[in-house]
Image: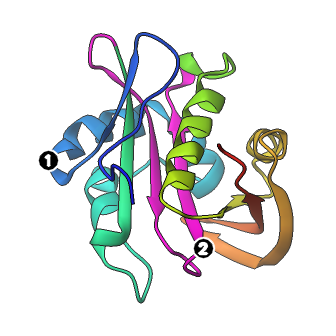
Amino acid sequence: MNNLTGFSLECSGYSVKQLVPEDAEVLQKLYEQCKDFAFLTYGEEFSSTAAREEFNTVPEGKTTQDSYLFGLFDSHNVLLGMIASLKHYRDQQTWWLGLIMLAPEHRNKGLGADFYRAFECWVSAQGVSQISLCAIKANELGLRFWKKMGFEVIRKTAPRQYGIKTHEVYVLSRTLNCS
């Protein structure tokens, strides 16, 4: 395995760092900026402990050592985006992307795609061949983004409760091709 603490972005002026629990306060500020995503997904704002919970919440059979959170920072060390992921979930060849968020003023400029692509190449360097994720049906922009990034819907789940909302969920997957 290669460097497990971070990866670099080809865009100058930005850096990517692995986030640790001590970064929860900074991460919480990003959550608060992304209220639109919270309302779309949960029907309410993120809780005041959402960032802290991000570091501690893992699915059954995984530990917090399997969880990787990365922050995208500008040249002034301001957190602009984050990726939350799990290694070897659901199998040894798959890395699960649990969440990607970008501050609203930095969206639709290609930065999210660059951030994801750098993450994908880093995951590929870990010897993994696939990334999977889920997206709610109501997040049409998110689904369009993931399809543009080369993901394909592999199945649709039964409706699930997210906060005060219920959503149909698509599971998407992509075979990696970073070299």
Q: Name which residue lies at 62% across and 23% down.
A: 107
In the image, is residue 8 above or below residue 48? above
Magenta span of residues: 75-104
Residue 19 percent location from the top left of the image? 27, 45
SS label for mark 2: loop
SS label for mark 1: helix
Q: Tell whether 44 sits left or right of 166.
A: left
Which one is in front, 80 or 122?
Answer: 122
Check disc 1 and report the residue beneath it: 22
Residue 76 percent location from the top left of the image? 27, 11
Q: Name which residue lies at 60% across and 73% down.
A: 93
Residue 55 percent location from the top left of the image? 29, 60
Q: Name which residue lies at 61% across and 28% down.
A: 114
Instruction: Report, in whole angstroms, how far the alpha carbon at label 2 lies from the one at label 1.
Output: 30 Å
Residue count near mark 2 (Cα–Cα under 10 Å), binned few <14, some 14–19, many ≥20: some
Task: Name the quarter where the C terminus is drawn.
Answer: top right
- Three-letter code, disc 2: Gln
Residue 92 covered by magenta stretch: yes
Q: Name which residue lies at 35% across and 59% down.
A: 54
For marks 2 and 1 on the same chain, the one whose residue lies earlier in the sequence: 1
Residue 146 percent location from the top left of the image? 76, 46
Residue count near mark 1 (Cα–Cα under 10 Å), binned few <14, some 14–19, many ≥20: few
Residue 84 covered by magenta stretch: yes
Q: Tell whether 176 sits left or right of 38.
A: right
